[in-house]
Amino acid sequence: MKILFLIVIFTTNCIGYLSHLGNEQLVQIWNRERIQDILDNPTESESLRSSLEHVQRIKEFGIQNLALSIDSGFEYYVPLSRKELGWNVSGSYPLEFKSYTWWFPIAGEVPYKGFFDYQLALEEEEKLKRLGLDTRVRVTGGYSTLGWLSDPIFSSQLEWSRPDLSALIIHEMAHATYYIPGDSVFNESYAEFVEKKGIELYYSDKSNPGYKEWIEKKNYKNNSLKLIKNTAKKLKSLYESDLPDSEKLEQKKITILEFKNQAILEKLIPEKFKTKFLSKDWNNEDFIGAVRYKSGGSYFEKKFLEAKGNFSEFHKLVREYEKLSKEEKEKILDEE
C-alpha cells in the first residue's frame, strides 16, 4: 500500500487532512539528503552507503531495462524519527465487495487514505466503523507523488530485504510512469505486474544475492493469493445471493473461518504467525485489499506478449485500456 501526497488545492472540504500531508512533506524536504552526496561522503556508514547504492542500481535498472520514467524519484534519502513511514486507512461495505472511497485533486477517487500519524489513522478508522464498514489500518510500504515531486527513499524502507526493496522501487517507478486518476484497481495491478516482471528479470541470474529469498517469498505469496481469491469469489457470490442479510452475515463468518482453517491446513502461514493469523478479525477489506493489487493479470500478460517482452512497447499498449468502455474495463480487471 502507499500514501499519495497531492499538490493540494485548498478549495476542498478536507483542508485539515491535506495540511497534515503538506506539513509532513515540508519536513521531508527539509530533512532530505541527496543520495549521491551521501555516497560521496566517506564518513557515512558503510551499511547506509551499500543500501543507497542498491537503490541507485535498481532505479537505473528500471530506466534502462523496464523503460520506466527517468523522472520517477529516488534521488534523495530521508531519515525518519519513527519506525514506520505511515499508515493507510481503508474500508468496505460489510455485505458488498465495494470499497469506501475518497476523492482528491489529481489522484481522483481512491479507496484508501494515508496518514503519517498513527493516532490520526485510528481516528479515521473509527469514523468508518461508525458508518458500519469493515475497516483496516495498514502500514504504508511505499510513497508516491505521481511524479509531481522527486519521491525519496526512507530510512524505514532500507530495513527491508533487498528483493523487497527492489520490488518497492520498481512499483513506485511504474506509478510515476503511468497512472490513471480515479482507477486504483488498474493502477495498482499495472504497477504490480511491472514489479513482478521487473524483479523476475533482475533476478534472472540465479547467482544474484537475494534470488533464493525472492523465489521462496514469490511462491508463498502465489499460494496464499490463490486461497484469498477463491474465498473472495465465495463471499462475492454470497453477497449477490437472495439470502436475507442476517443469513449472509452468518455465512460470511463461516466462510472466513473456513478460509483460516484452509490456510493452516495448506501450511500457508509460518508457525510463528499462526496465533496472530487465527486471532485476526478478517473482513471484506482484507480480501478486497489483496485482490486490488492482483487484478487483470491475463490482460497485462497478453499485452506483454504482444509487445514481445519489450517494456517500452508494453507501456504504450497498456494505454489502450483508457479507450475502453466501463464494461470492458471491468471485465478486464475481473480476469485472473
Image: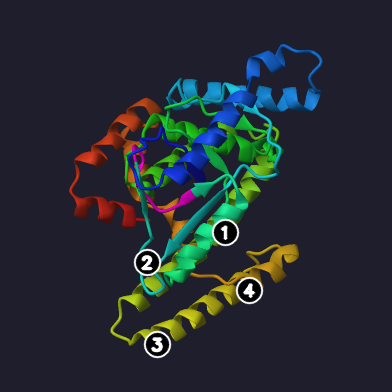
Q: Give the residue at x 70% y 44%.
A: 83
Separation of disc 4 and disc 2 at Cα? 26 Å
Say if mark 1 contacts mark 4, CB within 8 Å: no
Magenta region, residue range: 105-113
Relative to residue 329, is residue 81 depicted above or below?
above
Q: Position of residue 173 (x, y in %)?
A: 48, 31
Residue contact at pointers 3 and 1, CB within 8 angstroms = no
Q: Which one is in front in this view, the residue at disc 4 or the one at disc 3?
A: 3
Residue matched to label 3 = 246
Judging by the rendered image, the residue that carries numbered circle 1 is: 122
Type of residue at label 2?
Answer: Phe
Snapshot quadrant of residue 176? top left
Residue at 34 percent across and 43 percent down: it is 12
Nearest the eye: 24 or 169: 24
Q: Name the disc covering residue 97, or none.
A: 2
Q: Quadrant of residue 84?
A: top right
Q: Between label 3 and label 1, give the one nearer the viewer.
A: 1
Q: Are marks 2 and 3 in contact (CB under 8 Å)?
A: no
Query: Which numbered disc, 2 or 3, marks the residue that appears first in the sequence?
Result: 2
